[in-house]
Image: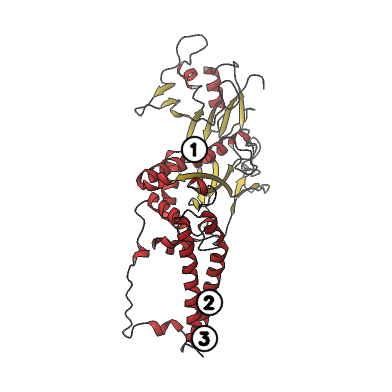
Amino acid sequence: MNLKRYLDAANAAEARVSEIAAQIDKHFEANETDQALALRPDLDAAKAQAQGAHQLYLSMLNATSGGPDPAQRFMPADGNLQVTMDEADQPFANPGEFFKAVKVVGQYPGREDPRLRSLKYKDATGLSEGVPAEGGYLLQKQVNDTMIQRMYNTGQLLSRVAADPIGANFNGALYNGVDESTRATSLYGGIVGYWIGEAGTITPSKPKFYEVDLKLRSVAAAVWATDEQLSDTVNLAAWIGRTVPDVLRFYAEDAIYEGTGVGKPLGIMNSPCLISALRTDANKVQFADVVNMWARRWPGFQDYVWLCNNDVTPQLDQLVLASSTEIPLRFVDYGPDGVMRIKGKPVLEVEYAATMGTTGDIMLASLSNYQTINKGDVQEMSSIHVAFLANEQVFRFTYRIDGKSLWNSALTPLHGSATQSPFVCLTSAST
């Protein structure tokens, strides 16, 4: 078998790719954008032909190699294999440097940074490995981790809810929740205990469960980068590191608080277990309101926080008893960190809460009872074509998450008719 013929064909196809890429590069440098773009189909076809030719050569090579392992013929005689780090193996210094490299290769294919080659073959998810707009180049994993860490470190809700990562080849998770709405007659949805005498009998009983079905939803943000920003890689890296995590965190936490469950997580405000305590005055938050909310919480959890809109905090600072100008000592106080506390639980100002005087302007929540799943790292892709003539490039960041309460109803305690829940909000006086 003449292997040289297949090798020559593969080399010729690769040379054709380089030739077309050089022509495109030349047209771009001459500001002949139309001519350059007109050659893109030829470049794509040449790349596909080169890939096929290389695969054919490797197939023929493996077919003629002796022994069970074709790769054995490339091993040193002494069996000692040494691995060296070439230019393509070196990491980018920062995200901005990577963005700049993607921008350059998108405009001038002949100037590809060697460090992009390992990324496009290892991580590409688009239709064409060599076209950045189709997923050819993806960000380094360290950028993903940094964004996730910032989202959770700066998030008032994401840092407190229950969160489980979902592995490869899965897009959701099932959780078994206890279907319990009352403890007056049984526990855990149906288990009954009996006091019995000697030789007494008991009636069998069993718990009741329900499924909490979570399927990943996607929240995304697109970031524009100009040539000026890309030329200042340190500034761009810092800006991306500040901005994108805050955007994704904002929408994820807003869904956790008030999401409808349609294309996004089912938020606490729409949870079937939410208890709405009726406020005393339509335009205020009074001492009696806070006390009533506290009384409706399920007391079995210790991680409660007060979530409120920032226009509610002046009301909390002025809480007084109806018949006095003061409130019980240390009912409301401030810790060494400057955070307000009510009954020892921190008050967190979140803009997802409704404005003062409306349902959901303040909430008492045990956030560990809200379950989320995520796909781990933020996924990124880039395109130079959306605003090509404006010398801008767009980077798209996607985060996959879902969540809902682990409780499917409020709970009636053993004694008393007032239901309890890990989530209690104050409702408007007209409701």
Q: Determine which residue is flagged by label 2.
A: 53
Q: Which amino acid does label 1 sit on?
A: Leu
Which quadrant of the figure contains the C terminus?
top right
Q: Determine which residue is flagged by label 1.
A: 157
Q: Which amino acid does label 2 sit on?
A: Ala
* Crowd band around label 3 with a 10 angstrom C-alpha radius: few (<14), some (14–19), many (20+): few
Q: Residue, x 54% and y 39% (percent of image)?
A: 251
* Crowd band around label 2 with a 10 angstrom C-alpha radius: few (<14), some (14–19), many (20+): many
Looking at marks 2 and 1 on the same chain, the residue that comes earlier in the sequence is marked by 2
Secondary structure of residue under mark 1: loop
Q: Determine which residue is flagged by label 3.
A: 63
Q: Residue, x 34% and y 67% (percent of image)?
A: 86
Looking at marks 3 and 2 on the same chain, the residue that comes earlier in the sequence is marked by 2
Give the image quarter of residue 40.
bottom right
Q: Which amino acid does label 3 sit on?
A: Ala
x, y percentage for residue 131? Answer: 52, 60
Which of 146/51 is in front? 51
Secondary structure of residue under mark 3: helix
**Apparent side of residue 239 relative to residue 264 in the rendered image (left or right):** left
